[in-house]
Image (cartoon, helix red, strand yellow):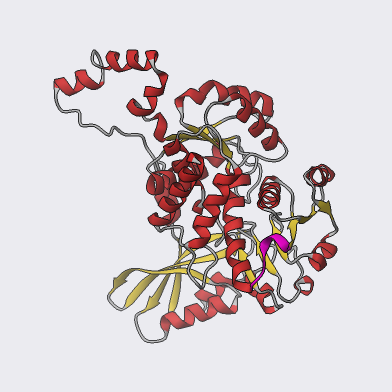
């Protein structure tokens, strides 16, 4: 599995020194993801070089850098760990607390008036508490990123990252909730018990098939909207990218044969949303018989991988298996999204070289574009459940804001998340 490796390399401060280091990296078949000059000391510069490397294979890179007469490997940077130190989020007061009167207003005895008002009219909690601006981010750690079942606590950095994005792009307080439980019925009981604390529930990184039953149970029980992001958030951003790609190549998406490789939570979520959007032919491949039966119950059909590649106009892969799609299987004009992170089923440049019309991976088509605006929109609307119309509206908003040379817009653009929120809110109102 490829993970970010951040090297600290000292080089002589003279022409060509850095170029020789970068050449060694290139000769090892590695790509520089980020380059930063950390400090300059007289005639030497210390560089922080970010690469994506297989965690157990070093390609002889370290020895080759050390062999250069103009460079020295100092070690590895702790930049990523430093940014996580102490956690990435915290809860803090929005109000000043400098006088005795302020204390009495926000706590006792003044707070009693607000409590009694909410007792008499529970809807007032949306106005006088943070509930209408809060989302529980719930995981049991069974399907964290591309890492798999690593446990709830090990998944906390991902949940904190989600919370940080909620705050940054949607003004929402995302609260990580770690549940050490695998049974979906018991998880539903636990989440239902704490649900009154939140305006909405986001399920995150919960493995299939438990995730399907858990979401269904919570949607039946709760008045708050519930969304499993791995299913529906991923599906929204994928649909947005497909809208853009189909338009660029002059095709009607609903007329395309879509091949879905991998029928876990993301794969099933994508297949379901595409069918709801109007795609009539969805072909699926998976090693799990239960997953294939689930697709067939939805109206899709199964196929072996080579057959799927031969039949499909659009290929979407969510398997976590690096290099699963062979280059010789790619057909001229196909749209191929290999969405597994951190390792794609086929690298986009390889698919394009084999004739694909468009190719992308999970770095570009990322659900970070979807969930902040999805939840901001539904909370603003006061709706109790996500509908397909809301998901379609979010996808259309994303596709409409994609630059001409991209399939989706920049995830760091706050206006994009605002546009998604407005589209979802409007769809909810309808």
Please name the residue shown 69% across and 53% down the image: 278
Name the residue rendered at 37%, 37% in the picture: 90
Tell me where residue 16 appears, x and y as whole percent.
42, 86
Q: Is residue 55 left or right of residue 428?
A: right
Quarter of the figure with residue 130: top left
Task: Classify residue 218 as left or right of residue 121.
Answer: right
Residue, far bottom? 15
Q: Is residue 409 left or right of residue 210?
A: left
Which residue is nearer to you in this view: 184 or 421? Answer: 421
Image location (x, y in percent) of residue 45: 35, 74
Please state the extent of the stretch shown in magenta in the rendering.
250-256
Looking at the image, residue 155 lies above or below residue 58: above
Look at 41% across and 32% down and name the residue there.
Answer: 132
103 relative to 25, above or below: above
Instruction: Examine the structure image and report whether residue 283 is included in the region drawn in magenta.
Output: no
* Image mark count: 0
Q: Nearer the viewer, residue 110 or 126?
A: 126
Residue 174 in view (yes/no): no
Q: Quadrant of residue 103?
A: top left
Q: Residue 414: image x %, image y %? A: 38, 55
Report if residue 164 is visible in the image: yes
x and y percentages locating residue 126 in the rendered image: 39, 28
Q: Is residue 120 left or right of residue 401?
A: left
Which residue is nearer to you in this view: 423 or 372? 423
Quarter of the view holding residue 13: bottom left
Q: Quadrant of the N terminus?
A: bottom right
């Amino acid at each position: 599995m490829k993970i970010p490796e951040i090297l600290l390399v000292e080089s002589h401060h003279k022409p060509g020194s850095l170029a020789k280091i970068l050449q060694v990296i290139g000769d090892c078949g590695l790509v520089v993801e980020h380059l930063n000059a950390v400090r300059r000391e007289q005639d030497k510069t210390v560089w922080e070089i970010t690469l994506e490397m297989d965690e157990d294979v070093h390609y002889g890179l370290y020895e080759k850098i050390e062999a250069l007469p103009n460079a020295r490997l100092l070690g590895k940077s702790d930049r990523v760990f430093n940014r996580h130190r102490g956690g990435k989020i915290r809860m803090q007061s929005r109000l000043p607390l400098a006088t005795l009167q302020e204390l009495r207003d926000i706590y006792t005895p003044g707070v009693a008036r607000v409590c009694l008002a909410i007792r008499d009219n529970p809807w007032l909690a949306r106005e006088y508490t943070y509930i209408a601006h809060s989302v529980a981010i719930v995981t049991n750690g069974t399907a964290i990123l591309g890492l798999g079942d690593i446990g709830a606590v090990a998944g906390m950095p991902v949940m904190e990252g989600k919370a940080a994005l909620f705050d940054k792009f949607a003004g929402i307080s995302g609260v990580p909730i770690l549940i050490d439980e695998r049974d979906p019925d018991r998880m539903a009981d636990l989440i239902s018990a704490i649900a009154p604390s939140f305006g909405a529930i986001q399920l995150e990184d919960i493995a299939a098939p438990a995730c399907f039953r858990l979401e269904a149970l919570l949607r039946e029980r709760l008045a708050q909207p519930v969304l499993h992001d791995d299913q529906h958030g991923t599906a929204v951003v994928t649909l947005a990218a497909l809208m853009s790609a189909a338009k660029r190549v002059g095709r009607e998406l609903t007329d395309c044969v879509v091949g879905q490789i991998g029928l876990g939570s993301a794969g099933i979520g994508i297949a379901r949303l595409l069918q709801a959007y109007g795609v009539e032919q969805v072909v699926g491949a998976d090693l799990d018989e239960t997953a294939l039966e689930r697709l067939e119950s939805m109206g899709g059909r199964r196929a072996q991988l080579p057959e799927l590649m031969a039949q499909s106009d659009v290929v979407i892969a969510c398997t976590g298996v690096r290099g699963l799609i062979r280059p010789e299987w790619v057909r001229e004009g196909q749209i191929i999204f290999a969405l597994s992170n951190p390792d794609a089923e086929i690298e986009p440049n390889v698919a394009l070289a084999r004739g694909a019309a468009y190719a992308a991976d999970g770095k570009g088509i990322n659900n970070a574009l979807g969930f902040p605006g999805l939840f901001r929109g539904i909370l603003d609307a006061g709706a109790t459940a996500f509908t397909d119309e809301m998901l379609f509206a979010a996808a259309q908003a994303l596709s409409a804001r994609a630059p001409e040379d991209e399939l989706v817009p920049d995830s760091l653009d706050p206006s994009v998340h605002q546009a998604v929120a407005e589209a979802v809110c409007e769809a909810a109102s309808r």
